[in-house]
Image (tube, rainbow, N blue to C red):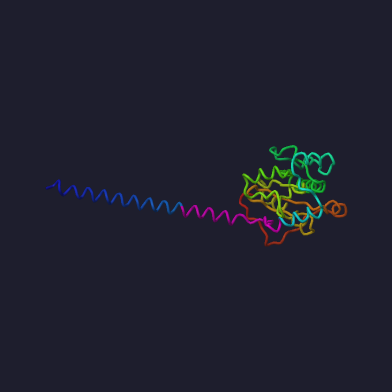
Amino acid sequence: MKKRVQRPSFWLVLFALLACSQAFGLHNRDTAKHSHRGRRHWRRIAWNPMFRPSHDSLLRQNEEIDRLELPRIADDDELEELKLKEDLVEIRESQSLRFDPRLDRRRRYCRIWAREFVEDLSQAYYREFHSQIQVNSAVRTIKVQRKLRRHNRNAAPAYGETASSHLAGVTLDLQRRGMTKQQVRFVQRYLFYLRALGLVEPEEERRQWVFHVMVSGRYSDWRLTQSIFAVEAPSQVETADAQSE
């Protein structure tokens, strides 16, 4: 009789343990999901750029290229031809300016007014922080842009009214990752002033962590007659980018 009494009690205890372990597992999964959602929410709050990429910005960049009647460079043959004609000039490395070492030397070129812009910015930045501005990307060909699109879904198209402005040699990508909050704000204020004058069309790219800057052909004439200085941006526009700390 004792064995008959013990058997049901054994199964009851086993059932109770199984029920508790399942409840504990469900609780852990729910907690993990909740914390994961919390992390995603935090990242959305942190990304608050002054120059948010947009369809309208791409249209403005291409309107300037069309105004200047610049070609979109198809391949390396056209690229080399523009270099020989000095329609594209080499970006000069200096105390205040460096390149991402991964950038192909054949593509460290741009239009002359874009070079003037990045030299002016890098010199102002160096005077303030004794640190260099880094160029991550400059001129591209349609062939390169099409290849880039295959593994970067955020890259601009190679054709059409929103095509990448890199294809005309008027745009530079400047490294933002690794900058302090003060350095990011300095560059933002500098670009804010120039954009107000219609001299640049900037974007802050999230995936690549760069300042993408299209430089207007009007920049060269403007810089001959004006002092270059940055003004304070509107106080309500602040970056909360945690990675710039």
Which residue is nearer to you in this view: 78 or 61? 78
Q: Would you say the magenta stretch is mainly helix, strand or loop?
A: helix
* Residue drawn at 75 percent across, 38 percent down: 106
Q: Residue furthest right?
A: 225
Residue 23 seen in the current view: yes
**Residue 44 x, y percent position in the rendering:** 58, 56
Which residues make up the magenta segment? 33-57
Which residue is nearer to you in this view: 199 or 58? 58
| Among the 4 quarters of the image, the one containing residue 202 | bottom right
> In the rendered structure, does residue 120 fall within the stretch colored magenta?
no
Would residue 150 appear left or right of 173 to someone viewing this image?
left
**Residue 180 x, y percent position in the rendering:** 67, 48
* Residue drawn at 80 percent across, 40 percent down: 90
| Among the 4 quarters of the image, the one containing residue 162 | bottom right
> In the rendered structure, does residue 54 fall within the stretch colored magenta?
yes
Which residue is nearer to you in this view: 226 or 171? 171
| Among the 4 quarters of the image, the one containing residue 51 | bottom right
**Residue 240 x, y percent position in the rendering:** 63, 55
* Residue drawn at 68 percent across, 50 percent down: 157
Picture layout, residue 85 above or below residue 219: above
* Residue drawn at 44 percent across, 53 percent down: 31
**Residue 23 x, y percent position in the rendering:** 35, 53
Residue 94 seen in the current view: no
Q: Residue furthest left?
A: 1
